[in-house]
Image (cartoon, rainbow, N blue to C red):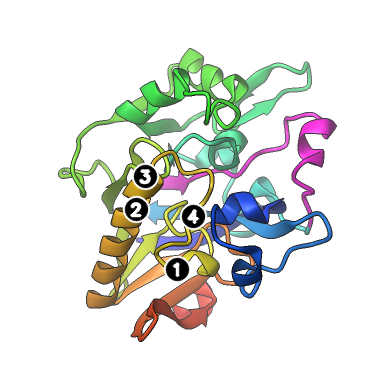
Amino acid sequence: MELYPIEAGHFKLDGGAMFGVVPKTLWERTNPADANNRIEMASRCLLVAHEDRLILIDCGMGNKQSEKFFSYYDRFGPYSLLGSLQKVGTHPSEITDVFFTHLHFDHCGGAIEKNKKGQLQPTFKNARYWVHQKHWQWAINPNVREKASFLPENLNPIEATGQLNFIEGDGAQLENSPFPFDILLMDGHTEKQMLPLFNYKGSKVVYAADLIPTVGHLPVPYVMGYDTRPLQTLKEKALFLEQAVANNYLLLLEHDPHHELISLKQTEKGIRLDQNFTFTRYF
């Protein structure tokens, strides 16, 4: 098995929303804000090459939305999903599976594109699209809080093509994963967020998704305002970080533009960043 981080683009989000009730004077030490109170974010996907499968984990927000939509997120930088796939020698038609940690637009938008006629179609025409069955039901019947994150133009075409596949099961870790990695389940951010856990070249690597989007979110109380069950997130994050330190997990951060792969250590203030690596230099 080989893993390839795929940079799908950088954008900005409101720092207050990203840190909830934590005061700006604290969170801006690690995540400095611009004049509009927005912090820099990455869309770091992951390509998994295993035997005859090419599995793409998350897809970024894509490029099919309107200029008005993207104006809220101030996209910047040279990266794009398809450009980064090309750099590792992969064409969209070669992707066999697309695995969604969850279906918020910044994680799944790149899976659907507009063709030359302006019609929506799958970006990865030969892939099976995977989502947790309970999360799918949560997404297509959204609560008021998350409705703006679950966009019909991202979800409906997946179902219409017949490429949608479900993962089922409950508990902290799924049994009998259909992938060459384990799956951790988290319910604080949204219903049944899935975090891949890899045994990779002698190390354990977790794709941290929105449980720990940036290094600044390592302190347990630093919970996003977007989380639907913040008290659940506190419990899940505390338990996960304890396991991560005990088992020497490396965390691949999806949303931190400055920290790609990190190790952790126990300190007097709690579990914090130990070392920061680039994926290719570490492995």
Q: As drawn, is 13 to the left or to the right of 201?
A: right
Distance between the alpha carbons at the discs numbered 4 and 1? 21 Å
Residue 231: x and y in percent read 35, 49
**Do callouts 1 and 2 mark residues in contact (Cβ within 8 Å)?**
no
Q: Residues within 10 Å of mark 4 (few under 14, many from 20)?
A: many
Camera-near label (3 vs 2) is 3
Distance between the alpha carbons at the discs numbered 2 and 4? 10 Å
- The residue sitting at the left extreme is 175
Give the mark nearer the N terminus: 4 vs 1: 4
Q: Is residue 128 visible?
A: yes
Q: Residues within 10 Å of mark 1 (few under 14, many from 20)?
A: many
Residue position marked by numbered label 3 in the rendering? 188
**Quarter occupied by the N terminus:** bottom left
Camera-near label (4 vs 3) is 3
Camera-near label (2 vs 4) is 2
Q: Which residues are magenta?
A: 54-76
The circle on residue 46 is: 4
Residue 235 among magenta residues: no
Distance between the alpha carbons at the discs numbered 1 and 2? 18 Å
The circle on residue 196 is: 2
The circle on residue 218 is: 1
Distance between the alpha carbons at the discs numbered 1 and 3? 15 Å
Give the mark nearer the N terminus: 3 vs 2: 3
Q: As drawn, is 275 to the left or to the right of 179?
A: right
